[in-house]
Amino acid sequence: MSHIIKAGLVGVTGYTGMELARLMTHHSSMELVRVTSRSEAGKTLAEIYPFLNRLPLGDLVITQPDPADLADECDVVFLAVPHKTAMEIGAALLAEGVKVVDLSADFRINDKATYEQWYDVEHTQEDLLKEAVYGLPELYLEQIMGARLIANPGCYPTSAILGLTPALESKLVETDNIVIDSKSGTSGAGRGKNVGTLFCEVHDSFRAYGLGTHRHTPEIEQEISKIAGKDITVSFNTHLLPIDRGILSTIYTKLATDISLEEIHDLYTDFYAEKPMVRVMPLGQLPETRFVRGTVFCDIGLVVDPRTNRLIIVSAIDNLCRGASGQALMNANLICGLDIDEGLPMAPMMP
Amino acid sequence: MSHIIKAGLVGVTGYTGMELARLMTHHSSMELVRVTSRSEAGKTLAEIYPFLNRLPLGDLVITQPDPADLADECDVVFLAVPHKTAMEIGAALLAEGVKVVDLSADFRINDKATYEQWYDVEHTQEDLLKEAVYGLPELYLEQIMGARLIANPGCYPTSAILGLTPALESKLVETDNIVIDSKSGTSGAGRGKNVGTLFCEVHDSFRAYGLGTHRHTPEIEQEISKIAGKDITVSFNTHLLPIDRGILSTIYTKLATDISLEEIHDLYTDFYAEKPMVRVMPLGQLPETRFVRGTVFCDIGLVVDPRTNRLIIVSAIDNLCRGASGQALMNANLICGLDIDEGLPMAPMMP
Amino acid sequence: MSHIIKAGLVGVTGYTGMELARLMTHHSSMELVRVTSRSEAGKTLAEIYPFLNRLPLGDLVITQPDPADLADECDVVFLAVPHKTAMEIGAALLAEGVKVVDLSADFRINDKATYEQWYDVEHTQEDLLKEAVYGLPELYLEQIMGARLIANPGCYPTSAILGLTPALESKLVETDNIVIDSKSGTSGAGRGKNVGTLFCEVHDSFRAYGLGTHRHTPEIEQEISKIAGKDITVSFNTHLLPIDRGILSTIYTKLATDISLEEIHDLYTDFYAEKPMVRVMPLGQLPETRFVRGTVFCDIGLVVDPRTNRLIIVSAIDNLCRGASGQALMNANLICGLDIDEGLPMAPMMP
Amino acid sequence: MSHIIKAGLVGVTGYTGMELARLMTHHSSMELVRVTSRSEAGKTLAEIYPFLNRLPLGDLVITQPDPADLADECDVVFLAVPHKTAMEIGAALLAEGVKVVDLSADFRINDKATYEQWYDVEHTQEDLLKEAVYGLPELYLEQIMGARLIANPGCYPTSAILGLTPALESKLVETDNIVIDSKSGTSGAGRGKNVGTLFCEVHDSFRAYGLGTHRHTPEIEQEISKIAGKDITVSFNTHLLPIDRGILSTIYTKLATDISLEEIHDLYTDFYAEKPMVRVMPLGQLPETRFVRGTVFCDIGLVVDPRTNRLIIVSAIDNLCRGASGQALMNANLICGLDIDEGLPMAPMMP
């Protein structure tokens, strides 16, 4: 390819920024030319991330975030900053003519009031809210390819929506009795200084932390309601795993129709046949977070419990890769006219 | 106390045997005088468990399991052997006049046919099945104190039943819509040689492994059906955590009555007021497996999700201590006329 | 015992404070009556440490640190605060007539100049420096029993000194060629907010962090020089383990005399025969940190490498228990006239 | 490149076989066309490794190991089988005209008697022992490129030799006082069924396991003796880390010359300037196993302790990738005329 896409990354000090730097190392058609951080500007990437020594990105000097400079240098910019901050800098970048992939929640929720209720801040960019495309390629491939602003999906929603979509689209399950029990690795809690995520507070333990109140709830409900064609309220609940990466969601549904596990499995397999980043596991196998480690795969396992007439869907992703930066790169590839999987590692790291 | 109870342990090489040896080290009214193992007979405990060096039990010589010898030397015998084996040796010991606490599943299921269906072996001791008392002290304190054969509860059932009992007894929740999503530490998988539980197959990963098919299902249903006064079928599902010890069950129910979270919390607190090994957490706090590590506590957290009208109960135990050997010791204390908590550590090890 | 010793704890929010609270739960002759914290005063212990719910200490209200109040209420006070702070409050408490066990480094280094060089602060209590007794009971039992100020040893020094003492006392090894390669669990890094000790920065990784520069160096050299009867300079080096608790030191020495491994083993076994908290492992066995988890044991393994004429000593302790709060409690027991092991758990938690 | 190299893998069920399958997924010039296993023949790779679902290698059918068939289909064959077995099948393959990269120890030790002494089996292929090239590209690049039989280095030796080479070549350190304290992740212990490597036996613990007796000792000594130009005996000692992947070796030496840390650092940097898979870290930084996770990098940190006149070298690799399959692929690339780094991931997975 003659033209190399130039990319910028706003916010490099968190785990999603770190992951994007990892992924961009192997991309042959897109180059990271700007990385920004208010606190680390002036250093090279390798100075803050020694794992990048002797790699091309290691010498990249971190700059202060400056929309004009980013617009001058970049075709596309990733935003890996907290919500509310993303909204403002995203608007500035779009005004300068740059494409934007926002990893925060700021453009995910279509309804301004719903966003403001769950995130407790004012949304100042309502027009962009309408324009943004929800960056889940299995659902919105065409729209993503034509977009200039991508709302990159949340980690939990990615696992939940991909797990539920075929069942809801085919009206296999009751829509008023869905329980999503999700467990996430600790990188999902971010890289901020925090006693609660110290090694000794997480290691060799397990806890629930968000029961019925997690901010990813409206995002899940928005998307699955569209698929089902009616409003769905889910019980969405989260737990903290003593692992670095990985989300596994166990999704409990009630079957609404008379269908065998084999038929459901066929239906899922067909639905994802042309969508190679989702792997419906053979019957009898269940996902494990390590099977998707470091990749954009979403693995789905299916079980029917005839005693309770439930379809149980198990869905696993890597929260940092498919749940954040890897999916962001899929979206950036698409809006820049590249193949969806360019630069993405496909083989999970085992063990 | 002038009289020291003499105890035996059949099967010392697994994690429950190991845990019982740990607990007995600090017991001042009961002494472990016999430990048996077919493969390790002739060695001292310290030879197979170096952590017992310079402790009184370290010098205890492991013997071959021999009911007559155990009966001669012991007042009470713990069985930490696989199901089916336990049934036979338990019967022999009872015939010799020894009290028995069986940690296997052999005497937990009241109905012979149900046992045989789920465990796929013939039950040869139907009379003992009728006699055995289910050793959950919060439910059966009186019966345990008068028993000679205790069916020590399974680890998952202990967490599930203690979590559900107050809600079911007070008819707070619908009985046909209960989902139990349980996660267990790896010691629950035993100490046998197995690729699936090697460090590199479990560490930094998470998986579901028993969805709708775990053998603890009928045990849970049996006990909660008694409490509710009607037959309950649950969706019980298990996952493997990369931690040594601990079970956390997230139990999803639908409220059947108009009641506030505060009222539910009061009801739980009252129910367990005289049962000090269950701790109903203050509102706003949720259990973590580390809070009960190494102890017989069961911690319960309560959440009401008004959006879905669900009561979510989170219940945490240490699967080896409360879920096996610690509870066995509580039962042994009771059937030998001691206080329930003698010899038991109460302060969890943190971190 | 009719008289209960009353104890205070200054600084309850760190891991050593947390560990002391755990240990005091089971002490029948000493009661924790005061716990202090500037940031958490007014709360109960159970409010900040839910694992203490329904335990006697859970209801203890945290107070501001006030020497006069502590002196009024306590016979002995533990200081679990940073160095420099400990020095000041320790002096105030001693002036009020209270016995003090200081877990910081402030009174460990006999020489004021050496302390100031390594810790980079002025030592304002030189008289107390002279008075303080180094609280390693295997070396200073008599002095501890008569002391009013104990300098509780550092975690690494405890493992290193106990490992080297018999060899140095018997002049088995060269004194100018000792390398101590120590590895510590992450609780040793404290409970402060710090990116470097976040779960995702420590888990599934391993690193060296203090090579030749750790502040425990002069403490080790001071004590082993006394034993050897001459000044020793050691190469002391530290690493961070992805475990909660535990230090394992691999100590490399050159044999200075013609002696067999069996003779060395006998010599070590004899040396520690009357010191039951040190366990010299049988030949062929090596320590593991889990074998001492939660206890005050120090396990020592011995290897002679005939190819290099080296004696390799492996020494393992629990850094929080033997390396801090458990040893502090041993010292408090001794200065209060109790048996050294009162209240201390002896059986490690396995697994 | 028009011609795709065809590769075979004998022994796919262990961790090194698993790792080679991962790496080959991304290789564009070499294709894995045969994988063998006596126990799993007939299944596809995805059936035993679900992480390979929907990847090209997932459909590859495992065959019985058959030298004639391998020779028919492959240009190069990797041997990931135990020592002794490798020797026999390697000879058969070479006789058929196939190039061989042997991951076992069978061709690493130049001296037949030394091999037989440490490995306790007869070496039946003495001629091949003479022919084999030790596959450490930083030392033997030219020879590797012309070889048909590569003895792929051991994991520990790779870290130790790369760490010591510049110091020994420049005669910076005494050769009779080298201590190598190595710590390895548990994948190094293999994927066999074994109580000692069960999750609950390794997790949250740390132990020494091979002090002065590890079979990698003669391999290290052979190579560093060549570099130093004289026979060296080292004290080489190993420990087991509760991590999946990674070796960190802390190497203790005595300086033999008057040289500053800065000069040593320059010397190391120059030595590895043209060898991009070794990264000499900036002064003040030390390696961490996570910085090399999943890659063939070897990271080296340097410290001079002026108090003891020691140069301490810290060397970190990924034991499965650089220490086994990644290095094997580097060697296969070289003997097949490809660039050394084709198909190899360069960016470590963080966290």
Image: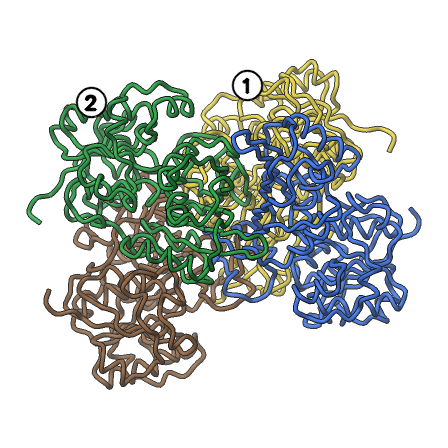
Chain colours: A yellow, B brown, C green, D blue
Is residue D324 positioned above or below C115 on the image?
below
Q: Quick check: do tags 1 and 2 share a chain?
A: no
Q: Residue at x 58, y 44 (%)?
A: A229
| Image coords of residue C279 (percent x, y) | 35, 56
* Front residue of A223 and C121: C121
D9 vs C169, left or right, is right
Q: Quadrant of the C terminus of chain B?
A: top left
Q: Nearer the viewer, residue A162 or B141?
A: B141
- Which corner quadrant of the image does residue D211 belong to? bottom right
Element class at badge 2: helix
Which residue appears farthest toward the right when viewing the image? D2
Question: Which residue bears the numbered disc 1?
Answer: A124
Please indicate whether residue D48 sits to the left or right of residue C349 in the image: right
| Residue position marked by numbered label 2 in the rendering | C92
User: In this view of the protein, which residue sits in the foreground, B96 or A218?
Assistant: B96
Q: Which mark is residue C159?
A: none
Chain to which the residue tagged by mark 1 belongs: A
- Mark 1 vs mark 2, CA separation in Å: 57 Å
